[in-house]
Image: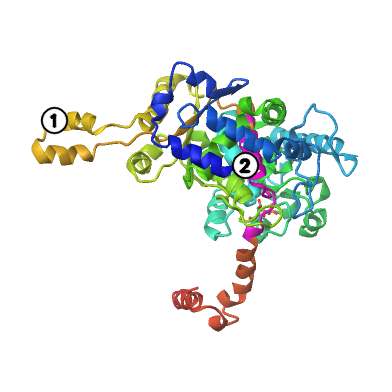
Amino acid sequence: MWDVLKSHHASVEGRRIEDLLDADRAATFSVRVGEMLFDYSKTNLDETALGLLTDLLDRTGVAAKRGAMFAGAAINETEGRAVLHTALRNLDGGPVEVDGQDVMPGVLATLDRMAQFAADVRDGRVTGQGGRITDVVNIGIGGSDLGPAMATRALAPYHDGPRCHFVSNVDPADISEVLAGLDPATTLVIVASKTFTTIETMTNARTAKAWMSERVADPTAQFAALSTDLQKTGAFGIPETRVFGFEDWVGGRYSMWGPIGLSLMIAIGPEAFRAFLRGGQAMDRHFQAAEWRDNMPALLAMVGLWHNQVCGYPTRAVLPYDNRLGRLPAYLQQLEMESNGKGVSMDGETLQVPSGPVVWGEPGTNGQHAFYQLIHQGTQVVPCEFLVAARGHEDDLHHQHRLLVANCLAQSEALMKGRTLDEAREKVRGKYDGDELERQAKHRVFPGNRPSTTLAYPQLTPETLGMIVALYEHRVFVEGAVLGINSYDQWGVELGKELATALGPVVEGEEDAGGKDGSTAALVGFLRANGL
Ligand SMILES: O=P(O)(O)OC[C@H]1O[C@](O)(CO)[C@@H](O)[C@@H]1O
């Protein structure tokens, strides 16, 4: 199947995308869900490629795998777990069973408990030892940080609760900078860790506890925990009333819909948080019901598979023209690369195609003044994924928003059209002539024919954000299902963790680095000589 797709790509490789753009293409190569539009007409995909890709989804059993996921089957086979983050946003859906037990009563009860706690903090019924909570510090890393941090920034216009801060890195610079401006007596610390063992998080949590002990009589009274391990949260001293648990069928990078979203809920309030969940649920319903050709997550996945596995483009850029989505690329790096960055299929066979692209990006227009040079004229093709809202939240500055939108649309147009040598000559004619004109013109040529997609929506509301996050989650699912990999484990992070633990005594100076490879030993030597 990949061979057929690759030979189709070879046969159309030189074709210009703009030549495909007849009067109908923008309508047929786009899809809507509610008020959201995904346009993929500025790619080199054609009906034949889409037909082959939908066949690929059918032959690899994506629909059955989707059914199994929503039904609570243990599709995370290497960890023997179901994958049911969708249950966390199944607000008014039916029962969802894991091992014959409906999990929904528990999910909804936890959501109510979170909402009560968030309301109590926001309304001053839960206070610090110095009065009303003014600041919340979420300590977590990976999925216990990126989701809520990304969403809290994205939904800043909806904040009407205490200020929220995020600490993730074990680098002491991170926690010191955050705590420096805060009053321990009015700060709530949320320790977010599914396992409650992650070394970065537990180290930062202990540092926060020590910081709080200096000023308040009972430090853990101002802590809350979000975790699947109630024993460990208890051992840390956090009272059960302040612990919000979840089950092992919620993967870390898929967990912002439940307790891991508590800091977001405190910032924007339970109602806005429920709107975020409703957005996710709307995308779930669409994903389950729509035919592949009209299915937004499946189409995102087909575009992704076409660009990475078929065309061989090694990266994809996520470019939000929505400044508050500034952490979306980082969030998607974990979601996509930790999920699908695997080397073997579910049955242990080496993958025959790349497992997925490097995902990167920055908000526009900033990226334009940094790396867009390479995107436009560099020798590698970088498929670009633009996101843009029709309206910002700054009504008095709508003229600036229009300028932002013009830039977004101009970039996808420029990537597609490029500039020919003839057009470049016209740009420099009059300034140069002869050989110099030719040389100068060549520097101003844009090859064009570079693919991009655009996700457009009226405004970045909680509901829209929910739709966006669920959209990307399901894209990851479809891509992983086609490749036959397990998108829900992350064994690739283990080796580094083990070696870091083993290096502990060496960097502490308790053991010498003699047993290490020459490079590592030399680096330890250098760092020790310089104050480690
Ligand atoms: O929530 P925890 O258990 O602290 O884990 C944090 C992160 O660490 C990982 O397990 C591996 O880096 C991620 O998958 C996870 O999101």
From the viewer's perspective, is the residue at label 2 or at label 1 nearer? 2
Q: Label 1 sits on what residue type?
A: Arg
Task: Give the residue displayed 50% in from the left and 75% down from the top.
Answer: 524
To which residue does mark 1 refer?
Answer: 429
Q: Secondary structure at mark 2?
A: helix
Q: Is residue 240 left or right of residue 24?
A: right
Q: Is residue 111 left or right of residue 412?
A: right
In the rendered image of this protein, does residue 334 appear above or below residue 151?
below
Q: Secondary structure at mark 1?
A: loop
Q: Label 2 sits on what residue type?
A: Glu
Q: Residues within 10 Å of mark 2 (few under 14, many from 20)?
A: many
- Span highlighted in magenta in the image: 467-493
In the rendered image of this protein, does residue 112 appear above or below residue 244?
above
Task: Give the residue displayed 54% in from the left and 60% down from the top.
Answer: 171
Choose top left, top right, bottom left or bottom right for residue 218. bottom right
Task: Please provide percent x and percent y for residue 129.
Answer: 71, 47
Q: Which quarter shows the N terminus? A: top right
